[in-house]
Amino acid sequence: MNRISLLGFLGLLGLLGLVTGNTGFYGFFGFFAFFGWVKIRPDERFQANLGRAAKNAFFAGMALFPIIVVWAALGSFEVAYSVGFAANFVIQHLVFTLSLVWLERGGGGL
């Protein structure tokens, strides 16, 4: 079993949207897509691609953080904190997932 597929269990957090009525939790249903990786054999190439995808996500978060800090300093701190935290979380996970899919399909150069 590929351990990256265990991230699919984070999709269960989307059920909180049904219980609490907070539609912000529905985005967690996207984590169910990680269950698609359960049959991928984690060989050396996959491990290298996983590292590259994690690197891309890390740098995306590092690029977004100063933007959020400037937004918080110049505007409303509460809005920048809540929206910026969510945006950073979403963008890092999207960059990671899209990079990993692209690299596993034969892409390179990232």
Image (cartoon, rainbow, N blue to C red):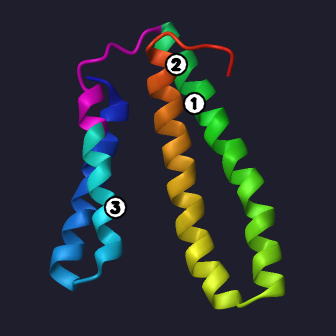
Write the residue at 50% across / 8% down: 44
**Do residues under tags 3 and 2 come within 8 Å of each other at their CB atoms?**
no
Element class at badge 2: helix
| Residue 38 among those drawn in magenta | yes
Write the residue at 76% across / 52% down: 63
**Image depth: mark 3 or mark 1 in front:** 3
Q: Quadrant of residue 38?
A: top left
Q: Quadrant of residue 101?
A: top left
Which quadrant, please, contains the C terminus?
Answer: top right
Element class at badge 1: helix
Write the residue at 31% across / 50% down: 30
Q: Which residue is mark 2?
A: 103
Q: Is residue 51 left or right of residue 9?
A: right
Q: Position of residue 82 (x, y in %)?
A: 57, 80
Q: Which residue is mark 3?
A: 27
Dot 2 or dot 1: first in sequence order is 1
Q: Which residues are magenta?
A: 34-43
